[in-house]
Amino acid sequence: MEPMGWLTEDFLSTAWSEACTRKVWEDWLDPIERRLESEESQGFEVFPNRSQILRALRETEPDDVRALILGQDPYHTPGYAMGLAFAVPRDVTPKAPSLKNMIRELNPQATDFDSELTAWRTQGVLLLNTTLTVRCGEAASHSSLGWEPVIQACLKLLNRGDRKVALLWGRHAQRFEAFLDPKVVVPVHSAHPSPLSAHRGFLGSDPYGRANAVLGTTRQGPLNWTAVLNSTVSR
């Protein structure tokens, strides 16, 4: 077998490696790695750093997922991207507007919350972007890099085991519903929490309550979404 690059080796070290057929490796992961290395050699800054690109997949195994929140691509502002959709490091200010609206939907008065969403992740919430890297200052700059077929292969691994939910916010996330079996992964649609659309279908849509209505019928029961409020739990 040919030697693998750092990205494929990192992917194969995760429980999601079942999705890594030879085609995924040769057609997508290897070219992505070469493109990332090319951009770095040209002086472009890419977010997140290498150790965090696959963080969401490394932290939550497919069989442990109870809820999926599907984002688009990492934050392109320095210091914000951490390999987890919508989450930002605790020491980052100001907090990302979409994240603030997600918390506002939980509690409009909340001013203190765990921006790394640790309490969600430890309950089995997968915070996954459909594109896992981005060039500094250029939103969606890696949307054609080849990440989406890799993510599609991963999503198919969720179509087994206990019922779970997929919180699909906005048209981009909802495109990926085609790769999910609705009998196993129940979609919960809302508008995107971005300031551009939050008042047109996200705020007031009760995505967390609707998700728990599904999860309440499962063996593990509903999630404690409000656990991220006033949370200072360390990773």
Image (tube, rainbow, N blue to C red):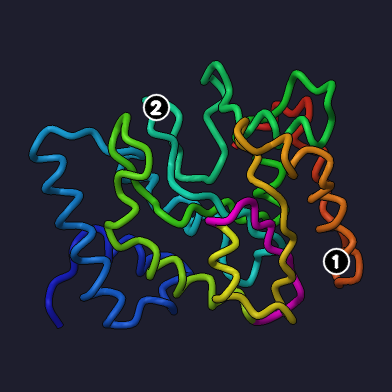
Give the answer, above or below, for where 71 lies relative to 4: above
* Quadrant for the N terminus in the image: bottom left
Residue drawn at (18%, 34%), measured in percent from left and top?
A: 44
Q: Which residue is mark 2?
A: 77
Give whichever of 226, 109 is nearer the camera: 109
Residue drawn at (30%, 32%), measured in percent from left and top?
A: 136
Residue drawn at (56%, 40%), measured in percent from left and top?
A: 86
Give the answer, above or below, for where 101 lies relative to 157: above
Q: Which type of secondary structure does the marked residue at label 1 adopt?
A: helix
Left or right for 8, reference 205:
left
The outermost residue toward the front is 200
Picture mark count: 2
Q: Quadrant of residue 67?
A: bottom right
Left or right for 151, reference 32:
right
Q: Which residues are magenta?
A: 160-172
Location of residue 190 in the rendering, given as x and y in whole percent from the top left corner: 72, 52
Q: Which type of secondary structure does the marked residue at label 2 adopt?
A: loop
Location of residue 130 in the rendering, given as x and y in whole percent from the top left corner: 46, 57
Give the answer, above or below, for where 233 lies relative to 204: above
Identify residue type, mark 2. Answer: Thr
Q: Which mark is residue 74?
A: none
- Crowd around label 1: few <14 · some 14–19 · many ≥20 (10 Å): some
Location of residue 39 in the rendering, given as x and y in whole percent from the top left corner: 15, 43
Q: CA distance from mark 2 to mark 1?
A: 35 Å
Q: Which residue is mark 1?
A: 214
